[in-house]
Image (cartoon, rainbow, N blue to C red):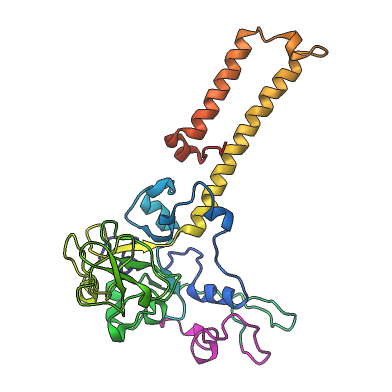
Amino acid sequence: TLLFDFRNSETYTTETNGKHTATIESYEAMEQNHYFEYIPWRGRTSSYWDDSMLFHNTNDVNKGGNLAQNTNTYFRGRAAGLWSLCEQTSDPSCENQFCGDRGSAIVRGVEVPAAALNADPSRFSTKHAQTAMTSNLYDNALYCNGQGSETLSASCASVNQYDLENDIAYPNNRFQTFYCMGVTDSCGQLTDEPETLKFCDSDGNVCGAFNDKAVDCSYMCEGYCYWPGSNAVNPNTSQVSSFTQFKTETPGSSAKYQQCVNIGSQEAANEALRHAQGAFFVSIVIGQIAGLLVCKTRWLSIKSQGMQNKFMLFGIGTEVMLVLFLCYCEPLNVGLGTRNLRL
């Protein structure tokens, strides 16, 4: 029996282990009802934003100062992959509800017709004509994370959406984990289309794209994700991003292809929360100092009254120093969930 590894889908043998989790079917249902995952513009323009959040390597801990947890802890709570009910063929109750011919992804999430035998639990009531939703619970789901071994069977094919006929593992499913090689950092920028992936010459100069390049334009460019089947050559190691290599690998720190995941949305929200917590704590301290000065005198101004109480001054200074440590000392930031203030 394989030991559990959050990177390896073959070790997810207990399904969701009794935990409620979102599935790819629920994501599609949300989009059918015009709910989309996005990163707020203010988050993208904030001081804490790091583009590496869009292609985070699951082997990295605290990359860019954005992950406040151990890697195993972080991705056990939010698996670097997707769960699917429709791909779990061992649960026949899913058939004709939101899987199979009567529940294709094209109509998934729209209003349930009155003639339907069961309302789809992944659909949402957006119109008064929608039939009541069922309270069905499903305890069997298939986990897919796009790793190489999943290309050897058809179980995760519709979730990963790879072009297996041409041996190309470009991640067409934007919710899915993806796999990269790179010049220096394996996880890099993912292009919108496979055809727009840039290629360079041996000196690092851009000279073409995936489907439009010369014979000597076959090397990786710095900063890009070269997915399995792109057949680019690393100018430093001569390693080729081949599909064959991908099929034989198990995800991990020693693999040639590194497992990458987009954590931008949740980390932008988490960082905004941490900055807000830091600012709120500072506001409490400022309020306490203001209250102390207000209580110091009833009629005279502070200028007339003076600030001669050395114990009071020591207390104010100590509190200010504590605030500075909690806001600007990184080890304390991680433990207490605070961040520095923008001055």
Query: What percent of the width, then of the height, locates residue 126?
Result: 69, 77
Name the quadrant containing residue 311: top right
Query: Left or right of 292: which side holds 318?
Result: left
Question: From what the image shows, is residue 104 above or below residue 175?
Answer: below
Of 21 and 149, the residue lying toward us: 149
Residue 92: within the magenta? yes
The quadrant the N terminus occupies is bottom left
Question: From what the image shows, is residue 245 above or below residue 280?
Answer: below
State the residue lying farthest toward the left: 238
Query: What percent of the width, then of the height, locates residue 222?
Result: 30, 60
Query: What percent of the width, then of the height, locates residue 218?
Result: 23, 72
Query: Left or right of 18: which side holds 148?
Result: left
Decide if residue 122 is in sight here.
no
Of 198 and 252, the residue lying toward us: 198
Residue visible at 22% across and 58% down in the picture: 254
Residue 230: within the magenta? no
Decide if residue 210 is in sight here.
yes
Name the quadrant containing residue 115: bottom right
How many numbered marks does the figure carry? 0
Query: Left or right of 115: which side holds 139?
Result: left
Of 42 and 176, the residue lying toward us: 42
Residue visible at 52% across and 50% down in the picture: 270
Question: From what the image shows, is residue 106 above or below residue 231?
Answer: below
Q: Which region of the structure is painted magenta?
A: 89-117
Magenta-drawn stretch, dominant element (helix, strand or loop): loop
The quadrant the C terminus occupies is top right
Residue visible at 29% across and 57% down in the picture: 185
Residue visible at 52% across and 87% down in the picture: 104
Name the quadrant containing residue 318: top right
